[in-house]
Image: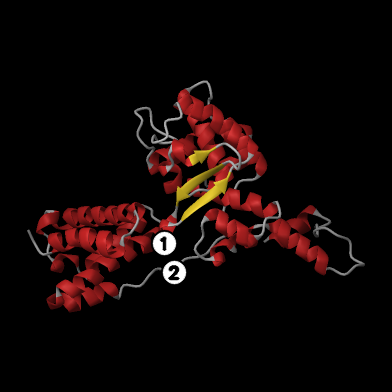
């Protein structure tokens, strides 16, 4: 066994588990990164992962791996940067244990994060949410589960890991109904539930038998749904909903889009940004400001207040179709 394998094992058991006490979600993310990296290097060199040396993981190899993520696996720049952050963390740990490879490690640590365009956050309009909720076939067990999951996700704004990790016992449907979860950074928070969501969960939990330690949204075999399974189910229901409402078919739909939809619904209802930040479990309120940029109705109200009193309210519309086309270019 080379020096890479024991160092990587110690990185997980000593650095992540003992020293930093990271969350299971972080361990899972780092694990997936190194599984992808080791498989990539094995495919390039033919060497078994347990026999790799640090010379096999130079800056050129890591750069090729990052390019592979983008071009072959079609990862976004954000995902690429997340994988690079995990690799950097391992190499910083290795620098303390293998000073003889300091030059190689420094070259890897010097690989820069990739810049990317920050687009407006995607979200669903109320009609699109209604179409998506109507898509699952509630005569089937999977359909009732998916309907409850979508309703729950749109109202609570939980992250995907929080959705799949939720247990029946985390739901409180009595006075002050809420869901309790441990979010990013090991922060516990309680999110209130609306009457519509309570009604859906009451039926679903009754079917689940109110088993407190069981997953709230399980597979047929009783295990937690995987992240890929949730995304796949949303893709199926998106296609069904698009037959009723074509606009939803043109939108990218992921579990995180449901989280964005929750935030936009709160913002449009007049909820303060500080409260939305606490609701979503953001560590920094600046993470919540993106929703202010995405909501055109807020900007239009601000524009109406700033416009001269003599001007008519509303948006400018070109008087002619050809002019409208030219001005849209």
User: Residue 35 placed where, x, y %?
Assistant: 24, 53
Question: Outermost residue, front direction?
Answer: 175
* Residue situated in front as seen by the camera: 288 or 228: 288
User: Residue 280 placed where, x, y %?
Assistant: 54, 54
Image quadrant holding the N terminus, namely bottom left
Quick check: marks 1 and 2 in contact, CB under 8 Å?
yes
Question: Quick one: label 1, few (<14), some, or many (20+) residues within 10 Å?
Answer: some
**Residue 211 in the figure: left or right of residue 300:** left
Residue to which mark 2 is pinned: 115
Residue to which mark 1 is pinned: 77
**Residue 156 in the figure: left or right of residue 46:** right
Provide the secondary structure element on which disc 2 rests.
Answer: loop
Q: Residue visible at 66% across and 42% down?
A: 126
Quadrant assignment, res 299:
bottom right
Q: Residue visible at 44% across and 35% down?
A: 217
User: Does 181 appear above or below 96?
Assistant: above
Provide the secondary structure element on which disc 1 rests.
Answer: helix
**Residue 228 in the figure: left or right of residue 179:** left
Q: Report the Cα–Cα distance between label 1 and label 2.
A: 7 Å
Question: Outermost residue, top direction?
Answer: 139
User: Does 320 appear above or below 95?
Assistant: above
**Residue 323 in the figure: left or right of residue 157:** right
Residue 251 appears in the picture as rendered: no
User: Residue 215 placed where, x, y %?
Assistant: 40, 36
Q: Residue visible at 14% across and 55% down?
A: 49
User: Residue 32 placed where, x, y %?
Assistant: 29, 52
Q: Residue visible at 39% across and 58% down?
A: 79
Residue 303 appears in the picture as rendered: yes
């Amino acid at each position: 066994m080379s020096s890479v394998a024991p160092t990587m094992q110690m990185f997980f058991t000593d650095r992540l588990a003992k020293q930093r006490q990271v969350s299971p979600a972080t361990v899972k993310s780092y694990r997936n990164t190194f599984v992808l990296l080791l498989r990539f290097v094995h495919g390039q060199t033919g060497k078994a992962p347990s026999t790799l040396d640090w010379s096999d993981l130079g800056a050129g190899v890591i750069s090729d791996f990052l390019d592979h993520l983008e071009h072959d696996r079609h990862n976004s720049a954000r995902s690429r940067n997340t994988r690079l952050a995990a690799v950097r963390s391992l190499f910083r740990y290795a620098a303390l244990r293998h000073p003889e490879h300091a030059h190689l490690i420094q070259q890897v640590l010097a690989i820069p994060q990739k810049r990317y365009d920050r687009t407006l956050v995607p979200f669903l309009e109320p009609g699109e949410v209604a179409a998506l909720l109507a898509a699952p076939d509630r005569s089937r067990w999977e359909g009732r589960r998916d309907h409850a999951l979508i309703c729950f996700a749109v109202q609570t704004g939980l992250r995907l890991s929080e959705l799949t990790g939720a247990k029946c016992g985390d739901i409180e449907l009595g006075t002050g109904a809420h869901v309790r979860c441990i979010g990013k950074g090991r922060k516990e928070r309680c999110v209130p539930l609306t009457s519509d969501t309570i009604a859906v969960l009451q039926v679903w939990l009754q079917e689940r038998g109110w088993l407190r330690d069981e997953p709230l949204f399980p597979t047929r075999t009783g295990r937690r749904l995987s992240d890929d399974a949730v995304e796949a189910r949303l893709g199926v229901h998106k296609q069904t909903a698009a037959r009723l409402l074509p606009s939803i078919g043109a939108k990218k739909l992921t579990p995180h889009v449901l989280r964005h939809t929750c935030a936009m619904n709160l913002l449009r209802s007049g909820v303060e940004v500080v409260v939305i930040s606490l609701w979503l479990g953001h560590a920094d309120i600046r993470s919540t400001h993106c929703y202010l940029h995405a909501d055109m109705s807020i900007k239009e109200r601000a524009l109406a207040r700033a416009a001269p009193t003599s001007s008519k309210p509303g948006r400018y519309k070109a008087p002619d179709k050809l002019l409208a086309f030219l001005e849209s270019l």
